[in-house]
Image: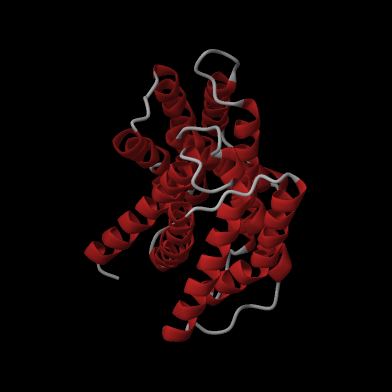
Amino acid sequence: MSRSRLALLTALSLLAFAANSLLCRLALGRQSIDAASFTSVRVLAGALTLFVLQRFFAAGRPSPRSGWRAAALLFAYAACFSFAYGSLTTGTGALLLFGSVQTTMLLTALATGERLTPVAWLGLAVAAVGLSALVFPGLSAPDPLGAVLMLLAGAAWGGYTLAGRGSQAPVADTARNFLLATPLALVVSLVSAFGFRSAVLTRTGVILAAISGAITSGVGYSLWYAALRTLSSVQAAVLQLCVPVLAAVLGIVFLSEVLSLRLVLASCMILGGVALVIVQRAVAARR
């Protein structure tokens, strides 16, 4: 793959990840749709789009292993993501999400016997302090329930990423995972609608959820998988740290959100600490 094509695929993928946060916050913040319905429409639109992509590009057959496990993790991510953004700003949500993703993957590596260098432990400590500073109660602290839900969404996405390592047919596998996650999302929507009577469906909300599922999720994930064939794991991990910054900028431009000093300082600590861990892992692996 040429450098220009790789750069284009990577940029579009990261922008799609950030746009997911913007679209969800835009739909829920203006009460155009409820969180459960947003999840259902998003997952269904992603499943349909990936099914078409699979057929059009002859993406092969999905692997037989970890189908329902991966689908359950995908559903958990999508559901927690949607419910969390009912009370979080775009940038804060994306920071909590991707900070949790990287932390989950690092903890998994430690649990399987990987050793960290002292510098990497320092980076992990800095990131933990930054996260604590972000969620510590105060005037500018995010909603506690929203923060917990977004951290759970990041943990689920980290698990989903680990479950998909080594996929020989990423588009086909992702299409299957979205398809299997659809009934789970629909059950939550039914429970929310009839149990809590909180269903809200407007044309604008459905369109935003469909765009999130079809384009920024379905197409965006496919582009990312294409870029991952050339990017190293360290490059991919570090590049994903750009997403919270992009999401914060989109929130400021399109939603007039305020960039607080607390968020800026916490972002520097969390993203800088995680980046330090990732780089040190790469250096240690080469040695």
Residue 159 location (% of width, % of height): 65, 53
**Residue located 49% across and 17% down the image:** 140
Taking 164 as reference, is 281 above or below it?
above
Expressed as whole percent of the image width and height from the top left, the position of residue 190 reads 71, 57
| Residue 66 visible in the current orientation | no
Q: Farthest left residue?
A: 4
Q: Nearer the viewer, residue 190 or 252?
A: 190
Q: Is residue 47 left or right of residue 199?
A: left
Which residue is located at x 55 percent, y 77 percent? Answer: 172
Please give left or right for residue 133 compared with residue 69 in the image.
Answer: left
Instruction: From the viewer's side, name the closer residue of 65 and 67.
Output: 67
Quadrant the N terminus occupies: bottom left
Please name whichever residue, 37 or 232, is drawn nearer the observer in this view of the structure: 37
Q: Is residue 50 above or below residue 154?
A: below
- In the image, 62 versus 146, the foreground residue is 146
Q: Can see residue 173?
A: yes
The picture quadrant where one finds residue 208 is bottom left
Q: Residue furthest right?
A: 195
Number of labels in the image equals 0
Looking at the image, what colour scheme do you see?
A: secondary structure
Percent position (x, y) of residue 186? 67, 61
Does residue 270 sit above or below 100 in this rendering? above
Q: Quadrant of residue 13?
A: bottom left
> In the image, is 139 to the left or to the right of 194?
left
